[in-house]
Amino acid sequence: MFWNSFILAIREIRRNVMRSVLTILGIVIGVAAVITLVTIGDGTTLQIKQQIASMGSNLLMITPGKRMGPGQSSGNIPFKQADAEAIAREINFLTAVAAVSSQSLKAIYGNQNWTTQVTGSENQYFQVTNRSIRSGRTFTDSELRSGASVCIVGETIVKKLFGGRQAIGEKIRLQKLSCEIIGILGAKGQSTMGTDQDDIVVIPLTAFQRRIAGNQDVGFIQVSVQNDVSTEKVQSDIERLLRVRRHLSYSDDDNFSVMDMKEITKMLTGTIQTMTALLGAVAAVSLVVGGIGIMNIMLVSVTERTREIGIRLAIGALEDEVLMQFLVEAVVLSSFGGLIGIVLAMTGSVWLSAALQVPFVFNGPVVLLAFLFSAAVGVVFGYFPALKAARLDPIDALRHE
């Protein structure tokens, strides 16, 4: 019975192709929108995780001042290099500790200039932030101690100032500091926040403090924790150590912040997933609208085929068979809409992923759920017209003009 109903449904759809296409348009748009939004959301979430992981594995960021809200802090007493040394010396299970200071300055070479981020730190900085040296070398111990005028630059600096030419051995000017390029960092691309991670010049911290900042302050401290070690435990140990070093009593609030990059990852991905779910729910409304369209057309179809239904009933067709015929037709219509929507969604997702430069993540369960939901829409909204057809009186149906 089901197969015969399916054949009749296909025949009826082919008889009114344009009407069928317009009927399932809401289903197509709804399924395509839901799958596309979820796919792009999953890709964005994966990209955020990858980019934050590229900043450093098990990374803790220690900044002066107690954070009060976006862009606000209080008790901003700067760190000293001795604080970073104390953390490296007294806290267990650390891979590397880097004291960092940075400032936006103009880099000049010949008649070319480019405003970039100048960072003062030590060789541990490259380990903490998972940065590699593409060519050249890192700082020597004597260069770090004496604050030598040497620097390691990112790919963007090489492109902007040297046009991609060989830069090692050349000298660039940073404010009043003329430094020799001894190394070039491997490319990392855009960060999660949209900043260029290759637009950077790294110099010894001592040189930054003496020649640029004019003080011994440290902007922030980055700590890399060993794998398979709880960052929460290390974070609490660092907080206790810094409270002692900054002479805070039991009743005093922290005048510093220790941020776990894993928490930042959870916050960002959680926000994106919430927005994706919200937009997906809005897009799912199209499925309901499409279901109403299917109900409307099926009611019209029942009216148009009243005599056909009467003939079937008169020659012995059961009510259940007529009910099945129209219900299957509604489900086939909505399922076709779901399949077309999936094809459009996959095509659109691949194109949007490339345009937005986010990974394409195929979410099989969501695709299957969207298809099943589209079929369920056909069942729900096709049942009433099918029931109306099944309950027609054969005599009245045969008299229908």
Image: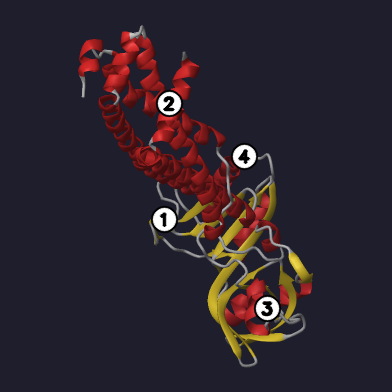
Numbered circle sitting on residue 9 = 2
Mark 4 surroundings within 10 Å by alpha-carbon count, few (fewer than 14), some (14 through 19), many (20 or more): few
Q: Is residue 384 visible?
A: no
Distance (Cα) linking label 2 and label 4: 60 Å
Give the SS element for disc 1.
strand
Q: Label 3 sits on what residue type?
A: Val
Distance (Cα) linking label 3 and label 4: 39 Å
Disc nearest the viewer among 2 and 1? 2
Q: Label 1 sits on what residue type?
A: Arg
Q: Which residue is mark 1?
A: 67
Numbered circle sitting on residue 230 = 4
Instruction: In this rendered view, identify the residue nearer to me: 267 or 300.
Output: 300
Q: Is residue 145 visible?
A: yes
Give residue 240's position: percent from left, percent from top. Answer: 54, 47
Looking at the picture, the colour scheme in use is secondary structure
Disc nearest the viewer among 3 and 2? 2
Q: Tell me if 147 is positioned left or right of 20 in this view.
A: right
Give the SS element for disc 4.
loop
Give the SS element for disc 2.
helix
Distance (Cα) linking label 2 and label 1: 64 Å
Q: Label 2 sits on what residue type?
A: Ala
Distance (Cα) linking label 4 and label 1: 23 Å
| Residue shown at the point (24%, 16%) measured from the top left | 398
Image vertical order of residue 337 relative to residue 158, above or below? above
Distance (Cα) linking label 3 and label 2: 66 Å
Q: Label 4 sits on what residue type?
A: Ser
